[in-house]
Amino acid sequence: MPDTPMQILSDTTLVTTLPYAALFALAKQAAASLGGKLKTEDAAAGTLQFKYRYGINPTGIRVDIQFRRRPGDETELVVTGRIGDSFDTLGAGKERGRAVLNEIARQIDTAAPGAQGSAPWPSPDAARAPILGQGDVQHRGKSKTVAVLLALFLGGLGIHRFYLGSWGLGLVLLGLTLVGLALAFPLGVILSLGDCARLIFMKRPNFDAAFNFSRVGPFTF
């Protein structure tokens, strides 16, 4: 690790030796400082979710922050942003997620020992991030490749959505396809191809954060 106890791995992920209790509180502070409203908080499961206003969209932007323990005293933090349960066609959700990650990184730099205004860190043993595979933080075993193939060949039936766990969206796609057969307009198939393209271009850390390390609801997009 560099002198600053942090390393940014991608536009969604960083690793730090900052103790988990301090990191969790710092991430909450950073996300809130950018105008976010706290929606869910679970330190035991290593999850935070914030909502940001986005025009007239009632669901707004959702930013999920997830913490996972790595070997040694390192904690991995993954930040993902999305437009509620809708398409992020303009990339506003991803941009907000990057902004939150950058603000967390800035505050970690500020909190580093010796930095102006830094405070004493709690003991690393005071609280630890949940380790992958234990408690509520488990890899659900969903494969991006399988999801893409199901979306490509059976997407009109919503099979890829049933596979990922968002069965509500699967039923919507199935219903649109059945209606489309009657109207000779395969809307469900067209939408599923868009879903397929989105999965193809989704980076694997983002896929894992959305479908393997999060609680997936019926309409999780």
Image (tube, rainbow, N blue to C red):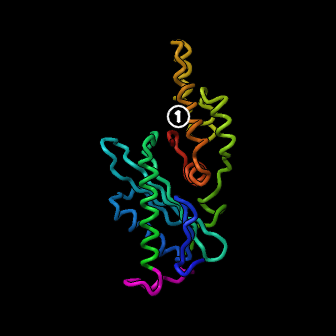
Position of 49 with respect to 211 (left or right) is left
- The residue type indicated by label 1 comes to Leu
Residue lying at 43% horizontally and 71% vertically, measured from the top left: 106
Q: Which residue is mark 1?
A: 169
Quadrant assignment, res 58 = top left
Residue lying at 58% horizontally and 37% vertically, measured from the top left: 197
Residue 19 is a magenta residue: no
Q: Is residue 118 visible?
A: yes
Q: In the rendered view of the protein, which quadrant contains the N terminus?
A: bottom right
Residue lying at 65% horizontally and 45% vertically, measured from the top left: 144
Q: In the image, is residue 60 above or below residue 186?
A: below
Q: Residue furthest left?
A: 56
- Between 134 and 24, the residue placed more toward the observer is 24
Question: Residue 21 at x, y = what percent?
Answer: 49, 74
Question: Residue 217 at x, y = what percent?
Answer: 52, 44
Residue interval drawn in magenta: 112-126
Q: In the image, is residue 51 above or below residue 172?
A: below
Position of 96 with respect to 205 (left or right) is left
- Between 14 and 176, the residue placed more toward the observer is 14
- Between 98 and 45, the residue placed more toward the observer is 98
Question: Residue 211 at x, y = what percent?
Answer: 58, 48
Would you call the spot at circle 1 few (<14 residues within 10 Å), some (14-19), or many (20 or more)? many
Residue lying at 58% horizontally and 64% vertically, measured from the top left: 9
Question: Residue 15 at x, y = what percent?
Answer: 57, 69
